Image: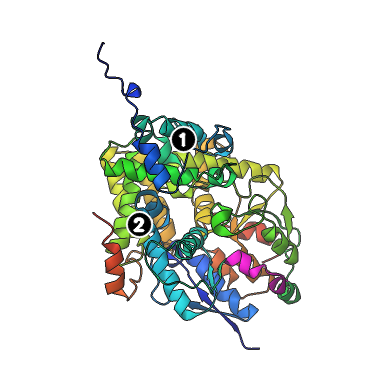
Amino acid sequence: MPKTTDNTLRPSFTLAEKLAQGNLSASACYQCKKCSSGCPLTFAMDLLPHQVIHLSLLGQEEKVLTSSTIWVCSACETCTTRCPNGIDIAGVLDWLKEEALKRGISVAQPEVATFHRYFLESIKAGGGRVAEATLVRRFTLFKLRRKFDINELKENMKLGWQLMKRGRMRLLGSHAPKGQAEIKEILKLIKS
Amino acid sequence: MTPMKITYYPGCSLENTAVDYAASIAGITPLLDLELEEITDWNCCGATAAHSINHELALALPARNLMTAQKMGRDVVAPCALCFNRLKVAEKALKNPEGNPLGLSYQGAIKIWDLLDYLTQETYLQVLSQKVVKPLKGLKAVGYYGCVVARPPDITDKKDYENPQNMERLLTVLGATPLDWSYKTDCCGAGLALSRPDIIDTLTQRLYERALAAGAECFVVSCQMCQANLDLTQERISKKFGKHYDLPVLYFTELIGLALGHPQVKEWLAKHLVNPLPLLQKKGLI
């Protein structure tokens, strides 16, 4: 028997089983494609939503966990709303994002994943509320380090200034809520 | 009349980019004999980031707010679509008869509302129709509801989630002309605004085009993420697509203020990037 390095020939069925445990039973899918037909983000996806469900059921972990699709989904919930079999498709995509990060997989959309991480860290830094200005500043620096685009920087600074002038950007952050002990306990769930 | 008191969950962006929304809400509610009391010590709901990559946190954060609201004893209104949605997610989880994952004791005697739904109850529409002093005559608008305020209905408990009508009903009461279009609940991609602006350019430009095709002169929104995404990007999208878009993005609460003659409407509108004044002046409304 020739050895193969093609992972598509080594399906891992733990994924489908785990989805079922998380009340995300995808096995009811009969591939009607209603999710993909109504999805407004398909133009930016590498796999269509119904393909993510199908590949998950076939045990093609690597394909779904490394896809762009799971990250460019905007969580608009159209697919979940319209699925005739009651599958929470957007919930499956969320589950896959979290799983990809847990496994330390190199994600296809680092900007999106990093933004989510910074958002949560900013809740922690703000003592329970998001300081939008701090988050934007930090994420802008992250993007600049990845790719220095002088035009984008200029545009962003102009927009920031316009918002600040109008009082729509608060430099000093939000008011932290007072129930700190209780909130800190919850914020422990955010691992920096 | 004694004002009706209700619990209020403003959410983080109403302290930041959506201060205009916050000010218009604070401005119009007394006119409707409604008193808002913030959830004591509220925290962020975790938004898209939490439900995307940390499902435990995505439940724990709104659950804390809900438990406090329960103690306060009144129904809760949320002006932000996602804050509303996350509160509802927490409510469903805490009311799960098979036991909730956080072990909290939640009785579920209070109702969670999104602000538009609350203010378009039949009683409020009647009050509004009596209080209009400046009908918004000739203002052609499309209502834009945003995504998660209605979807998924298993969470939101909404009945008309594919084609909601309450914004149109409100606009009619205020004297404006609501237009029919097919994109009122389509996504603008706001959650990707910073990480993938190229994606939202495509989604948002499509909304501009469909609104224009319907004959609209402005958008009316009930979600501050939609407002930011349609308003802040308009100059950039105009440049990118080589077509000048000039579609003001108004909060429904600002239009209530305008029709009811609130003195501070101009201050709220001055915070928008797409200046609504020329359109409203042309219509003789300001």
Is residue B41 among the parts visible in the rendering? yes
Is residue A152 rendered magenta in the image? Answer: no
What secondary structure is the magenta-colored segment mainly? helix
Q: Secondary structure at mark 2?
A: helix
> Residue B89: percent from the left, percent from the top?
48, 59
> Residue B110: percent from the left, percent from the top?
54, 73
Q: Are marks 1 and 2 on the same chain?
A: no
Name the outermost residue toward the front. B98
Q: Nearer the viewer, residue B281 or B257?
A: B257
Q: Secondary structure at mark 1?
A: helix
Q: Which residue lies under the disc numbered 1?
A: A53
Which chain contains the residue that carries disc 1? A
- For badge 1, the amino acid type reads Ile
Magenta segment range? B114-125
Q: Which residue lies under the disc numbered 2?
A: B56
In screen coordinates, is A25 left or right of B101?
A: right
- For badge 2, the amino acid type reads Glu
- Report, in whole angstroms, how far the alpha carbon at label 1 lies from the one at label 2: 23 Å
Quadrant of the rendered structure where residue A175 is?
A: bottom left
Q: Dot 2: within a 10 Å radius of its alpha carbon, few (fewer than 14), some, or many (20 or more) residues?
A: some
For image coordinates 51% across by 76% down, the residue present is: B7
For image coordinates 43% across by 36% down, the residue present is: A69
> Residue A17: percent from the left, percent from the top?
38, 40
